[in-house]
Image: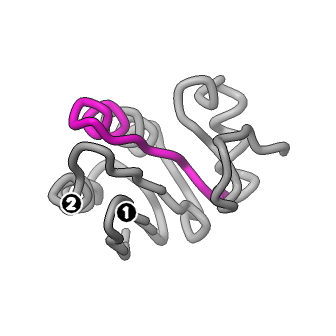
Amino acid sequence: MLTYTIIRREHSITAAPAGELIGYDIRDFERDILAWTGPGTAVEMDLAAVNFIDSMGIGFLLRLKGRIEARGGSMAIVNPRREIASIFFRYKLDGILCVRRAAPCACQRMAC
């Protein structure tokens, strides 16, 4: 079961899901993130507490990134566990999704 926390600041959001990021658990999560997203909003998707992601979860992240960018915002994946990060790198998704450590700096690829 997916649980999540969303922390809203003036021009940014930190979304922190916990558990499994899988297809049937993500609809409400996406709705809640998009409700707080507008022009100039930077969304950090903190995956530190995600222990599993399936193809629908990856599709969700790609779709969400596109929807956020269409609204004038941006999205970065931060703090993925090594197992999760390796999926992004293996399938070259790090060229599409910004994957980094949590440090608030320019987007840099994470070394695995």
Image point 45% across, 39% down: which residue?
Answer: 58
Image point 21% across, 37% down: which residue?
Answer: 71
Along the viewing direction, whichever of 78 and 83 lies nearer the viewer: 78
- Residue range of the region highlighted in magenta in the rendering: 64-80
Q: Where in the figure is residue 14, as x and y percent of width and height?
A: 43, 65
Q: Considering only vertical position in the picture, is 84 above or below 90?
A: below
Classed neighbour count for the residue bearing mark 1: other residues with Cα under 10 Å, few (<14), some (14–19), many (≥20) = some
Identify the image quadrant of the N terminus.
bottom left
Judge from the rendering whether residue 109 lies leftward or rightward of residue 8; answer left or right. right
Identify the image quadrant of the C terminus.
top right
Residue that carries the numbered disc 2 in the rendered image: 36
Farthest residue to the right: give it.
112
Q: Amino acid at mark 2?
A: Trp
Along the viewing direction, whichever of 25 and 101 lies nearer the viewer: 101
Image point 57% across, 71% down: which residue?
Answer: 49
Judge from the rendering whether residue 40 lies leftward or rightward of residue 109; answer left or right. left
Q: Amino acid at mark 1?
A: Ile
Q: Where in the figure is residue 13, as x and y percent of width and height?
A: 37, 63
Residue that carries the numbered disc 1 in the rendered image: 13
Is residue 32 found inside the magenta-colored segment of the image? no
